[in-house]
Image (cartoon, coloured by chain):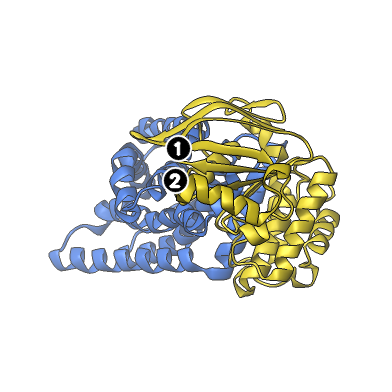
Chain colours: A blue, B yellow
Amino acid sequence: MTFFRQVAAIVSKDLTRELRTKENLSAMLVFSLLVLIIFNFAFELKGVDLATLGPGVLWVAFSFSGILGLGRSFAAERDQGSLDGILLAPGDRGAIVIGKAIANFIFISMMEAVTLPLFIILFNVSLTWLPLVGYIVLGTIGFAVVGTLLSAIAAATRLREVMLPVLLFPVIVPLLVAAVKITGGALEARPFDEYAGWFNLLVAYDVIFFVVALLSFEYVVEE
Amino acid sequence: MIQTLKLEKTFGYKYALRGVTLNIGAGEVVALVGPNGAGKSTLLRILATLARPTRGRVAINEIEIPAGAMEARASIGYIGHQTLLYDDLTVAENLRFYARLYALEDMDARIHQVATRVGIARRLDDVVRTLSRGYQQRAALARALLHRPRVYLYDEPYTGLDPDSSTFLDAIFNDGRSEGASVLFSTHDFARGLGMADRALILRGGKIIYDAPRGEWRDADGLSQVYAQRVTA
């Protein structure tokens, strides 16, 4: 029970801080919108089929913008020295990474909620909302969990802004490929069976990295 | 109670602590002094479970760490070089956050009690970054006392405090002693820091080179002489 109370405390604290400062959210939103606009103009000039490239562009916008927020997740704790404060709490330190991952998931989802409608307008795609939103949520869970864990590692290094993308992108390649394939399938209204394998990969990825984050965090933050 | 046996900590090839053996009983207030780089902060961080020892044994209230760190942390109150508070939250929001981390049942009552004890009750709704250094340190004290710790580990707690706040800190140590807590704090300020100490340790090059009760060094001047002979000389 203490574990869940600690998770709730960390989520609530991160949300309060972010809603007060709006540092991460505003940066993520502006960046994701810029990515969409730049891709839109670049592809339109060359006469590329936007519906085909759209899923890739969408996930580039999500992941590049999301990394801005993830980078600050533990860096801000380190800078203020408050990380020691939460590490001093009794109980399983896995609660810290799960709490942080949930908070990051919420921030990234908020950015995605603004980015997705703009994507539909700019890329002129028609979509069925329900499965697509579910797939995006599934991809975002894995992205937030892995990103949070690696953010804790990167925050302990001097070149943290450089380290996080270098560490994160190789690890999330399977997630991004699966997410793009599923998003493409949903956008083109193809039968689920055609991309069920990618869906299963995404689910497995989320489960595996959730467990990895929970078990390894203690060692990640150890001096 | 704080116990260490032949405690060692290395960073690469560099020794931060070398064979530190220590025993601090309940109700004992111990001052830890030494030059910069002597290993004071490292020792306190290991005892607070924030760093892992390379070799040797450590026990907090007879719980071996790091194996029993999850349990031991509930009885540790730690103050570091930073306040461990969130600058953009109010004092009350910070304390409520930590109260939830420690799963305190009587959260609001306890926050008010501790805030009153450290003299920050009127500033509970102030954002931390708007407070003076002295009040921030009081808020840090409130955080460290919130969960009723049995072991106080304070790293240079007198730094940046005005005389009033220092008197507060002395009172906190005194309360801790009478409640049977074990107190270990580091200080560079002999004049202010040693008033409450029952015992003093001098750490140099990661080793304890002096460990004596107040009777041997009497007061700040007495310990300054010992320090000059053993460290400065």
Q: Quadrant of residue A171?
A: top left
The answer to whether A80 is drawn above or below residue A90 in the figure is below
Amino acid at the residue labelled 2 = Ala
Amino acid at the residue labelled 1 = Val
Q: According to the image, label 2 marks what residue?
A: A152
Residue B55 lies, in percent from the top left, at 48, 25
Residue at horizontal 36 percent and vertical 43 percent from the top: A179
Q: Residues within 10 Å of mark 2 (few under 14, many from 20)?
A: many
Residue B69 in the figure: left or right of residue A222: right
Q: According to the image, label 1 marks what residue?
A: A220
Q: Chain of mark 1?
A: A
Q: Quick one: SS at disc 2?
A: helix
The answer to whether A56 is drawn above or below residue A31 in the figure is above
Q: Are marks 1 and 2 on the same chain?
A: yes
Q: Which mark is residue B93?
A: none
- Depth check, front residue: A123 or A173: A173
